[in-house]
Structures are given as structure tokens and as C-alpha cells.
């Protein structure tokens, strides 16, 4: 469906014109009646027993079992954040102190800081050309005899397409693999769900994620029962809760020093509700991405779609700008699109090589040129499961309006 000329011929909003979209993009409202009902159920459940909701109870047990079923088996533990989940996963693997952990170049600090806090050394890996995600070639260019693990981040909702090869080659070298699926929970590669490829997976279930457990939350998942025993101990003050004869009120039975990183019962109840519709959430987001990418490919003169796969669980959608077809740099172009009423991030700053405060902790000062290229040539359109055909049309109208004004 072509965008009407009148939508793209008026002055840009940044120059005082009327924006393409004069009302906000659709809010998500991830906490709906089903989540409200679950919170009430938690309160009622514990009130009937003369207790207040705590942690490690009925609803966390139900939540864990639902996650395990969704993942096709294995073991899960709910914790208080995605950052905590990555930290617990690293600690549970018992990696040699000071050893190097490879990590994706475009990611939240919550994928990198836990490496340092675990007494390990982060070493950044470049992405594949024109991608936010790492590839097998880039990973194994950075492996040395100091490498003990890899934190593979599935960025933006698009799974790492080389995950099978990365895990296979890493295991052949005795290297452990942690999957950070925070932005791609529910995504698949060759029909297999992300988080089931590596030794252990960690993800955030915080407020903006596709599957949430409230304002903050996280999950650690593995198919290895012995590894899960270590996970639950590191998540709750060293308690070996999976061992027969464990006494919660007897610290003599604890096994190691650890923090209290527990999830709570109310959050787990919300997580249970959100998980039940994750596949629907994913498909509705994919529907928007399919349409947006098609419109960009068909109608844009300066932008190209980032691309998607049917296994994606979209979190945001990058759009690539060809600088030779525009007189505006990427950030200025994106800010003009944003002013037309489109929710987006003009310049993604979660780029590890640029964080000066992080550099003293890194193994080296690798610049990751592929990741820098995609960061500097793309902007990220926000999305949620309530975006429709109208939002896709408004995004392409805004892009065409801006590129017409800034034509190279």
C-alpha cells in the first residue's frame, strides 16, 4: 500500500510542520487483567494460610515448572533481575578466576558487569558484518588458551544464527557457553528455542521484556541438574536447596558464600501469567516487523530493512540508513523520524568498546569495527505486541518524509 503523497510532502516536524503521527504510539500495558488476577490470587493464597507472600513458595514453584515445560524440559530458577541471572550463571560454572570470558559487542551492561563481579575478565567479540549479533568466525578469532566461557547475547530479539556452531566448537575446546536471551526469549534457531543450546541460559523478565515478571526479574535455566544445584545455592545465600536433608534454618548446612538474589512470589505469579501468552506476544510483534520490513524494502529510497527470521522474538527493529542516499547523518535522520511521532532510539549507546569506565577491566581494547558499523548506520524502532498495520504505515510515511527532505 503506497503512502499518500500528502503525508510526506508537508514540512518536517523538526522544522515546525505537522508530524505524520499526532497521537502516541500504542502503549503496551503488559500488566493487564490476567496479571492483576494473579496478584490477587497470591495475596489470597497466603492470607488464607495466615502468611504474607515471600519467596521460594507455591507461585515460584509453578512459575519454574511452567518455564521448564516451555523450554522442553530442564531446570529453571527465578531470580531478581537479568543481571543477577548472568552473575549466578557465571558463578555456578565455577570458572577459573581471572580467566577470559568472551562477550557480545552490542549489549546491556548487565551482560558484561557480572563477568567482572565474578572475578573474570571480559573480552569483547566483534559482530557479524551488518549485524548486532556475533558469529562463529568472530568468536573463534578471539579464543585463546585463557578463554573459559562465552556469553552469547541474542540482541534485539533476533537469535544468534550461528549458535549451534558456536556451542559445538566451544565445547570441543572445553569452553562453556552462557546464552543471554533477555531480548529474545521465545526465539528459535532451526526450530529449537534459544537458551537450550549452551550450558546455561540467563535472561531478564523486567518490565520491557517480551515476557515479564514485574518491574524487575530474571531466570536462570539449564538442562544439567548438577549445574542447577549450584545455581540455586548461588541465588540464595549458599543454600543447597536441592539436596536431601537440607535445613533452611540451619546455616551449618549451607555450602558457600553467596548473595540473596531471590525472586518474590508476586513477581513469579506475574511471570506465570506473562509466560502463558509469550508465543502470542512473539507472533504479534513478528507481524509488525514483517510488515515494516516489507514497506521499507518497497518504498524507501535511503533505508534498507535489517531483516528478520521467523524464529525472531522481536524486542526492537533496526533500520539501516545508506549515508550516500541522504544529506543527513544517521542520528540527525533518525531524530527527524522520531519528531514525526515515531518511537525509536536514534543512536544505540550499548556499545561495549565506547564505555571508558569499562576499559580498565577488559582483556584488551578491541574496537569491533563490524559492530561499530551497524551501530553507526542504524536506528532502532520501538515496538510491542499492540503495534498494527497503522503503525507500520506511519513509520514508513515518516521515513519517506524525512528522506525526501534530506535527499542526497
Image (cartoon, rainbow, N blue to C red):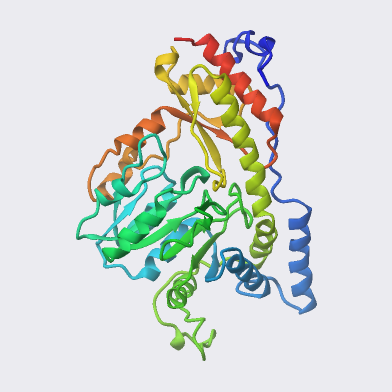
Instruction: Residue 384: tell me if it is visible.
Output: no
Q: Quadrant of the N terminus?
A: top right
- Residue 85 appears left or right of 274: left
Q: Quadrant of residue 294?
A: top right
Where residue 144 sits: x, y (%)? 20, 56
Q: Nearer the viewer, residue 281 or 28?
A: 281
**Residue 17 % position (x, y):** 64, 10
Q: Is residue 53 above or below residue 255?
A: above
> Closer to the camera, 219 or 199?
199
Q: Would you say 403 lies left or right of 358 here?
A: right
What percent of the width, then of the height, locates residue 129? 35, 36
Q: Residue furthest front?
A: 190
Q: How many marks?
A: 0
Question: In the rendered view, would you say 283 is above or below 75?
Answer: above
Q: Check the image and name the residue furthest to the left.
A: 145
Residue at 32% x, 44% y is: 357
Q: Is residue 198 left or right of residue 343?
A: left
Q: Quadrant of residue 5?
A: top right
State the image coordinates of residue 166 (x, y, percent, origin top left): 35, 55
Nearest the eye: 88 or 188 = 188
Relative vertical location of residue 64 with respect to residue 359 in this rendering, above or below:
below
Q: Residue at x 66, y 71 (%)?
A: 62
Residue at left 54%, top 48%? 311
Amino acid at each position: 500500500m503506497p503512502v499518500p503523497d500528502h503525508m510526506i510532502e508537508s514540512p518536517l516536524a523538526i522544522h515546525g510542520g505537522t508530524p505524520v503521527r499526532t497521537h502516541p504510539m500504542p502503549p503496551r500495558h503488559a500488566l493487564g487483567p490476567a496479571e492483576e488476577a494473579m496478584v490477587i490470587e497470591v495475596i489470597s493464597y497466603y492470607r488464607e494460610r495466615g502468611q504474607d507472600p515471600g519467596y521460594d513458595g507455591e507461585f515460584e514453584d509453578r512459575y519454574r515448572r511452567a518455564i521448564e515445560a516451555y523450554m522442553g524440559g530442564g531446570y529453571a530458577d527465578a531470580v531478581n533481575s537479568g543481571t543477577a541471572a548472568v552473575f549466578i550463571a557465571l558463578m555456578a560454572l565455577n570458572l577459573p578466576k581471572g580467566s577470559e570470558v568472551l562477550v557480545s559487542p552490542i549489549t546491556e551492561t548487565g551482560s558484561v558487569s557480572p563477568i567482572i563481579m565474578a572475578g573474570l575478565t571480559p573480552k569483547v567479540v566483534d559482530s557479524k558484518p551488518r549485524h548486532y549479533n556475533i558469529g562463529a568466525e568472530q568468536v573463534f578469532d578471539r579464543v585463546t588458551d585463557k578463554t573459559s566461557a562465552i556469553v552469547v547475547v541474542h540482541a534485539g530479539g533476533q537469535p544468534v544464527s550461528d549458535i549451534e556452531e558456536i556451542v559445538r566448537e566451544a565445547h570441543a575446546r572445553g569452553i562453556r557457553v552462557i546464552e543471554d536471551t533477555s531480548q529474545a526469549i521465545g526465539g528459535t534457531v532451526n526450530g529449537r528455542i534459544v537458551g537450550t543450546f549452551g550450558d546455561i541460559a540467563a535472561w531478564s523478565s523486567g518490565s520491557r521484556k517480551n515476557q515479564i515478571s514485574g518491574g524487575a526479574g530474571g531466570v536462570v535455566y539449564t538442562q544439567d541438574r548438577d549445574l542447577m544445584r549450584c545455581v540455586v545455592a548461588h541465588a540464595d545465600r549458599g543454600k543447597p536447596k536441592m539436596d536431601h536433608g537440607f535445613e533452611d534454618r540451619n546455616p551449618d548446612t549451607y555450602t558457600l558464600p553467596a548473595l540473596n538474589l531471590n525472586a518474590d512470589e508476586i513477581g513469579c505469579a506475574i511471570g506465570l501469567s506473562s509466560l502463558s501468552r509469550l508465543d502470542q506476544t512473539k507472533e504479534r510483534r513478528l507481524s509488525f516487523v514483517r510488515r515494516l520490513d516489507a514497506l521499507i524494502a518497497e518504498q524507501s529510497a535511503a533505508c534498507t530493512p535489517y531483516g528478520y527470521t521467523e524464529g525472531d522474538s522481536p524486542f526492537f527493529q533496526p533500520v539501516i540508513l545508506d549515508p550516500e542516499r541522504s544529506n543527513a547523518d544517521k542520528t540527525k535522520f533518525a531524530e527527524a523520524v522520531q519528531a514525526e511521532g515515531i518511537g525509536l532510539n536514534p543512536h544505540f549507546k550499548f556499545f561495549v568498546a565506547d564505555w571508558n569506565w569499562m576499559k580498565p577491566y577488559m582483556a584488551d581494547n578491541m574496537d569491533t569495527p563490524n559492530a561499530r558499523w551497524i551501530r553507526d548506520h542504524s536506528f532502532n524502532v520501538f515496538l510491542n505486541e499492540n503495534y498494527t498495520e497503522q503503525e507500520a504505515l506511519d513509520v514508513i510515511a515518516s521515513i519517506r518524509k524525512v528522506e525526501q527532505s534530506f535527499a542526497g
